[in-house]
Image (spheres, helix red, strand yellow):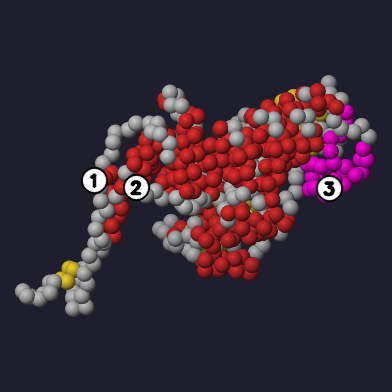
Amino acid sequence: MGTLLFKCPAFPWRHLRRAPPLLRMTSAASPAGPRSSSTAGSAVSVSVSDSPRRKKARRESPEGILRHRLDMCSKNGDAASAIAFYDEACLAGVPLSSHHYNTLLYVCSLPTPASTEEVDRATIIERGFEIYDRMKACGVPANEATITAVVRLAVEKGDLDVAFDLVKRMPDSGLAPRLRSFSPTLLGFCRVGNVEKAYAVDECMSQVGVLPEEGELAALLQASAEAEREEKVYSLLHRLRRTVRAVSESTAEITDRWFRSEAATRVGVEDWDAEEIRAGVVAGGGGWHGKGWLGKGEWSVVRTWVNENGVCQACGQRMVTVDIDPVETENFGKSLAELACQREVKTNFTKFQDWLKNNGPFDAVVDGANVGLFNQGTYGFNFFQLNSVVNALREMSPTKKLPLIVLHSRRLKDNLANRPQNKRLIEEWQRSHALYATPNGSNDDWYWLYAAVSCRSLLVTNDEMRDHLFQLLGNSFFPRWKERHQVRLAVSKTISFRMPPPYSTLIQESEVGSWHIPIAIDEESETPRPWICANRHGLPI
């Protein structure tokens, strides 16, 4: 252990003792309850739950107090105090668990708050490595959180090769690295311009099934652009296309700089096989061909927008609808069903799946609660509004079939549902096998979403689908599916629908080599989404 670096008020570790084991007294002769006593002279039998006492004993033990102190330091980002408590505990001989060590390493790996700038950051990093060495020497097993924290310390120290070696050896130790394990090293190599090592980290991530997100791809894109690795820039733009619908402002700036660079003017071919390019577009589902840079010379780069028909207002090119891979959709449906069965009563959800097989498919699925409550204020659920939407969707349907209405069962049992006109509607939907009532205790979101995915149908809801449930579905496929399938509702004197746009909001590469890159905005913003338009053919006059 290193010398004491930080001082804190001495804590009386030695005066704390573990609470003695609690005595549990039971007797077959006292079935009356937790506490029972017989007549004088008889044995007294006591059966008291010792769990609260033991919990209190653990909290008040030296280990428990240290844990609490370190947790508070972690919450406040206070590495100096955490190390001071650690030093005091070591002097007092307090045994440390993996939680103690992981908390210490985590708080040491955090950036030092501005309010404590006088603390020597380099010393904290060194103490972090000392703590890790002591953890290994004491035989305390490391986990993914341990290695990730040490990787961060190594990256901050500048030992990027050490950091990469640590994360590479995780699978050999039976540990599954996560994106947070790789990200510091990858970003570190990108930051210093060591693109070959950055590509090696990227490859290692691929081998263990860890997918980079926009931040990692943007760092690789910037490093590749600065190193004039045009083939990597090309492939990374396509990886961004598959990963995000619209790029962040910082990623947009990186992309803009690349297209304006001298290196970008030199890439590409002047002659290409148009039929081969067209075949690549068809094979990819539209919006890209993947055959490399087309054209030569300086790029015209502007920020613009596309109109409601998907036409770029700078170059006049029309954005296309990019097909969703049917295999991706099927796999997504399976994953969705697995998640639902984990979080719902499995028999309830499998019963719904069977019902859907027997009564589907449907051209549209309606989130009944969302539609019935939309724009109602304090008036409550509106069956008439729901029925108006249902009838409008039937008229739009090529099969003239009623859409599937998903409603929680409690909506069908309250006073509103029992009104004669509403009761007739419900009975009509039930006779048409167009209504599914989700059972008590269920979350109807799982039901209407699964139905829309499995039926490949439109989904009518104004739900933005941003809560925890939908975050479980990831940021790759689900946003693309939602864009192509969600229908939003507007109700005034008449029903109107905001249908999915006639083009896909994602990076698009045209058959003539131009690029259009959408930039992320607040989805509720009324201003047009900005796009980067990059082409070699100049802007129309």
Name the side, left or right, on which 245 lies relative to 536. left
Taking the magenta stretch, the answer to whether it contains residue 280 is: yes
Q: Where residue 535 sits: x, y (%)? A: 81, 29
Of callouts 2 and 3, which one flags the residue occurring earlier in the amino acid sequence? Answer: 2
Disc 1 element? helix
Left or right of residue 265: residue 239? left
Question: Does residue 369 appear in the picture of this structure?
Answer: yes
Tell me if I can see residue 394 in this picture: no
Q: Earlier in the sequence, mark 2 or mark 1?
A: 1
Q: Amino acid at mark 3?
A: Val
Counting other residues with Cα less than 10 Å from the Cα at mark 1, is it few (<14), some (14-19), or many (20 or more)?
few
* Farthest residue, direction top: 541
Which mark is in front, 2 or 3? Answer: 2
- Residue 528 lies in magenta, yes or no? no
- Between the residue at mark 2 and the residue at mark 3, the CA separation in whole angstroms equals 67 Å
| Residue identified by numbered label 3 | 282
Cα distance, mark 1 to mark 3? 76 Å
Hey, which quadrant is residue 305 in on the image? top right
In this view, 281 is above or below 540: below
Q: Which residues are magenta?
A: 272-296
Residue kind at label 2, given as amino acid type: Val
Which corner quadrant holds the N terminus? top left
Between 312 and 84, the one nearer to me in the picture: 84
Residue 94: numbered disc = 2
- Circle 2 crowding by C-alpha within 10 Å: few under 14, some 14–19, many from 20: some
Most common secondary structure along the magenta stretch = loop
- Mark linked to residue 15: 1
Inspect the image, locate mark 1, and give the three-letter code of the amino acid beneath it: His
Q: Nearer the viewer, residue 143 or 396?
A: 143
The Cα atoms of the two marked residues, 2 and 1, are separated by: 12 Å
